[in-house]
Image (spheres, helix red, strand yellow):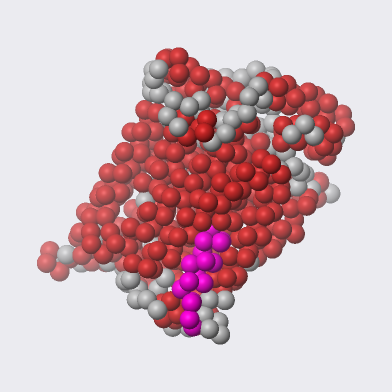
Amino acid sequence: MSFLKEMLDKKFEVVLFSSTAIALYGYDQGMMSLINTNVNYLNTMGIAEEDPLVGVIVSVYYLGCAIGAVLASLLADKAGRKPSIFACLAVTSLGNLLMFIVGLGFSRGAMTTMFIGRIVMGLGVGGIDSVIPVYSSELNSDGGRGEAMAKEFQSNIFGLNMAFAINLAVTNLLGKDNEWAWRIPIIAMQVYPVLLLSFIYRLPETPRWFIFHERNDDAKAALTDIYGEKDMHGKYDELVKAHEEESAHSIGYNDMIWPYSEQYHQTMVTIMGQVNQALTGYGAISVYGPQIFELLGIGVSMAEYLTQANYVSYFFLMTFAWLLIDRLGRRLLMVAGAFGISGCFLLLTVLGGLAMNYEQLGIQQKPVGIVGSVILFIATGAFGIGWLTQPWLIPTEIYPSTSRAQGAAISVVIWGLANFAVTLLTPILFNNLKFWFFLVLAITNLFAAWWTFVYCPETGGRTFEENQKFFEDAKEEKSWSVLKIDEGDYRHMPKSEKGGDENGESQPLLGGS
């Protein structure tokens, strides 16, 4: 009975739902890895494996994500978080179906249909990636926001593993020239939106959104559903007070994206978080994993199995992310992660060179490939712990309620554009730079570490209001350097275990048991 009660707990349901929704993003990355090398798929598209259009088909999805994020954030503010999530799931399902039917009974327009399907699915997934972090963050405590979202992004890696495992199984069973070896992994994705759409009715709308739209009775009903009648009134009064403090004026995109605008500083922290995440190179590695192992001298078949093993390791190492993110902070993990990834890529540059020139050097290729594979496993884990969750989490912590959805949308837009560029350029860089591509990533990771250390504040363990105070103090100091503002206090987690006062948004909506 106690287990059943836990299963029916609203906090558990929200985390489970949000985790499954975020897994959609990971599934697409794993799904396209082996589809890109399927002979029947390439013939259906009318392209060769080395054709740049392979990368364009993958990357155009991210443009859809960028547009979907903006549309979903507008809907989330106007109609509510739940209706926006529902609409995004439906659009995702439609896009996935369009991808599945490409070339079924028709040959003309196959590539056009695939492009449309990728864009439509991107609209839905981008919207989900925009709204879910806001929804989850608004329903978790200050000391638990990072852990909750890291668990959700661990599910992202579960989706990645599921997609690649299905791909690998059907490819080995049916062969690379069989059309169902690429159609089955696509249609299997439908399990996510279908399950989520059938479950979403059980979830609460955030009481904070109800209060922001002056639907006070609905807010009380939602709080009663979450806490019960006894604790509802105290939570309600806290949220009303927070709303009154924040709603003195409305905030739109113009107040966020133009230099010297009210929340331009927050927006630049958001933008650079996603840019730096893209610069780590792991968007490309997730999509082109097998090709990277081949670059290290691994055979085609073994490279595919090692890619799956790397994803499994990635999933389990993500446990350290949610164990550490609210204890050590977002900033420390990001800086250490970027330095670690950079060091791994420097080693991979050397090992890649040895693997490609082993005959001239008179060495064996196999040991080089083994060592390189181990280092790539380490680098992937470092990314998961240091960079997978944080750029999505920080935007939900530095904006007030009046602009939190817009801030999350900006985050997804930049993520979409940055990953569009990375996934588009990766095949070209592979073909031209070979192992020197690792050196490029080593340098970009060093940049990410430097920028984060100097300009990204530590947002963990603090209330939403405390994090906004950092940006107010930065205006007074006329500096964005975390090292200079408030004597560098925002370089690390607050000394006390419980940050902030007892007002405003310092109390969770679904925090505690």
State which quadrant residue 188 falls in.
bottom right
Q: Nearer the viewer, residue 107 or 477?
A: 107
Q: Is residue 279 above or below residue 112?
A: above
Residue at image location 49% in from the left, 83% down from the top? 107
Q: Nearer the viewer, residue 280 or 256?
A: 256
Q: Position of residue 504 (x, y in %)?
A: 68, 22
Q: State which region is magenta.
A: 107-122
Q: Position of residue 191 (x, y in %)?
A: 65, 65
**Prevalent SS, magenta region:** helix
State which quadrant residue 221 falls in.
top right
Q: Nearer the viewer, residue 57 or 163?
A: 57
Q: Is residue 367 above or below residue 254?
A: below
Taking the image as shown, residue 368 lies to the left or right of residue 114, namely: left
Taking the image as shown, residue 447 lies to the left or right of residue 247, namely: left
Residue at image location 39% in from the left, 68% down from the top? 54
Residue at image location 41% in from the left, 49% down from the top? 418
Taking the image as shown, residue 342 lies to the left or right of residue 110, namely: left
Taking the image as shown, residue 141 lies to the left or right of residue 8, namely: left
Do we see residue 23 in this rendering? no
